[in-house]
Image (cartoon, helix red, strand yellow):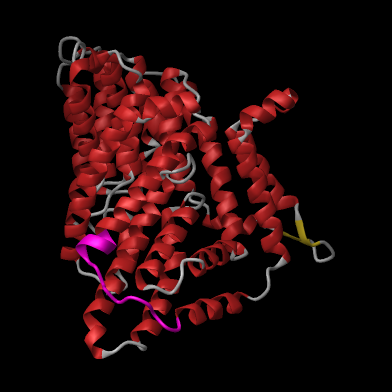
Amino acid sequence: MTFKRIGLFLGPILFFVLLLIPHPNGVSPEGWKVIALAVFMLAWWVSEAVPIAVTSLLPMLLLPMMGVTTLNKAAAPYSNPVVYLFMGGFIIALAMERWNLHRRIALNIVRLTGTNADGILFGFILATALISMWISNTATAIMMLPIALSVIDLLRRRISTAMEKGMDRFALTMMLGIAYASSIGGMATIIGTPPNVVFAGYMRETFDIEVSFAEWFVVGFPFSIILLLLTYLVVVKWMYPNRLGKFSGARELLEEELAELGPVSKGEKRTLWVFILAAVCWIFQAQINQMLPFLKLSDTAVALGAAVLLFVVPVDWPQNKFLLEWKDTEKLPWGILLLFGGGLSLADSLAETGIIGLIGNQFAGLSTAGWLVILGLSAVSLFLTEVMSNVALVTIFLPVVGGIAVGMGIPPEEMCIPVTLAASGAFMLPMSTPPNAIVFASGHLQIAQMVRVGFILNIVSVLLVTLFVKTLLPYLYEMG
């Protein structure tokens, strides 16, 4: 509470102090005002003194008051198409949750992985990651946790006393696997995690580069899979091996969980068809537009089209029941949508007042140090997101990183992609990301265990993202 109170007063104090200080040489008066606003927002975002979405309204309030820009220009980024892309993705996720489609998919994936202890762990990690590609990491972790706890409880009752230590490790790695896979899976798609959406919006607004669903998938999916496999090896095989071997009764438990769901409902089937239609349109958007140019498909149009379908496709026509009702949108994280808008508005102002260009100029001629710069920026992004919101971090950091890339004379995506990917990899602390907090509440792990594993995975992630960007990224872009 004290930290929040400090942030509450520190933000506006720093804001007014900076406004009273003469602007440095090389920085325009308007640019200095935007820097003051950025510091204000950073203090509130880091401390979470007020809801993050409320902080995101400050550009629309203060930029016109300071004479930096007009209200219309400050408000325009809040209606960026990327904001509506993510809203559509959220609505699809709400439909999957309403009809328990995500739970059925997860259980079936786990059932395919066998009854070996490590196989069950791999199944949960894989299922969690695949679900998290399409719905929020928080919702994924909440959905997977009770399934995992029921598996742990059943298996613990069927082992001997001599296997207790192995069972404790099995439970520990199950919890860590769900938390980490919830974050890693979201890296694979543009709608899988908020930082990806912030990246797409920033590239569109600042560099007029359109990052489609398919283009991100070509990059994000292989990176996500590689990191997921490394996570499994580090957590399950290296740091906490359980050596339990094969379980009896595991398959029966999964069958019981599936039986509780009952037969596939009409709502599940129709939600699945809408989901498949959206995924096909996202992935094969370019080919569809070539064959049917009048459609003018975009990622945002596909997301909104799927969202509309969910409200008009009936489940029970006589009862006037549809796949989604408007009351279901009460669960929609509207604050995240405001956060995107506020971040984009701040980024626009930083660019228009010359701050981004000024930062970039400081790095001109450093292209020979590309590897070290990317490694350093990725490390900063990843370790900072342990103590602050990854969305707020990316919102603040991307304009700086984009300016560095311009100053070094390299494509901005070569810098911005690793920073974005790294921001989704907070593995060390329970408070770093909601999935970490959710599994920590299970009581099956201690903070020291999470820190130990998380630190190793942080290092692995930073090295992997640097290697990935400098070696495979150019070829993947050519393929995409």
From the viewer's perspective, tell me whether residue 330 is left or right of residue 145.
right
In this view, the residue in front, 42 or 298, is 298
Residue 444 at x, y = what percent?
27, 74
From the image, which quarter does the N terminus lie in? Answer: bottom left
Residue 136 at x, y = what percent?
46, 53
In this view, the residue in front, 181 or 85, is 181
From the viewer's perspective, tell me whether residue 70 is left or right of residue 9.
right
Magenta stretch, overall SS: loop
Q: Is residue 6 above or below residue 446?
A: above
In this view, the residue in front, 393 or 462, is 462
At x 26% / y 37%, what residue is drawn? 42
Residue 331 at x, y = what percent?
52, 57
Q: Which residues are magenta?
A: 235-249
At x 26% / y 20%, what residue is drawn? 404
Q: Is residue 113 above or below residue 311?
A: below
At x 21% / y 26%, what residue is drawn? 371
Residue 61 in view (yes/no): no
Residue 396 at x, y = what percent?
30, 33
At x 45% / y 31%, what residue is drawn? 200
Q: Is residue 31 above or below residue 226?
A: above
Tell me where residue 271 sits by quadrant.
bottom right
Determine if the magenta segment contains residue 23: no
Tell me where residue 243 sits by quadrant.
bottom left
Residue 472 in view (yes/no): yes
Determine if the magenta segment contains residue 246: yes
Q: Pick out the residue farthest to the right.
A: 318
Q: Pick out the residue farthest to the front.
A: 245
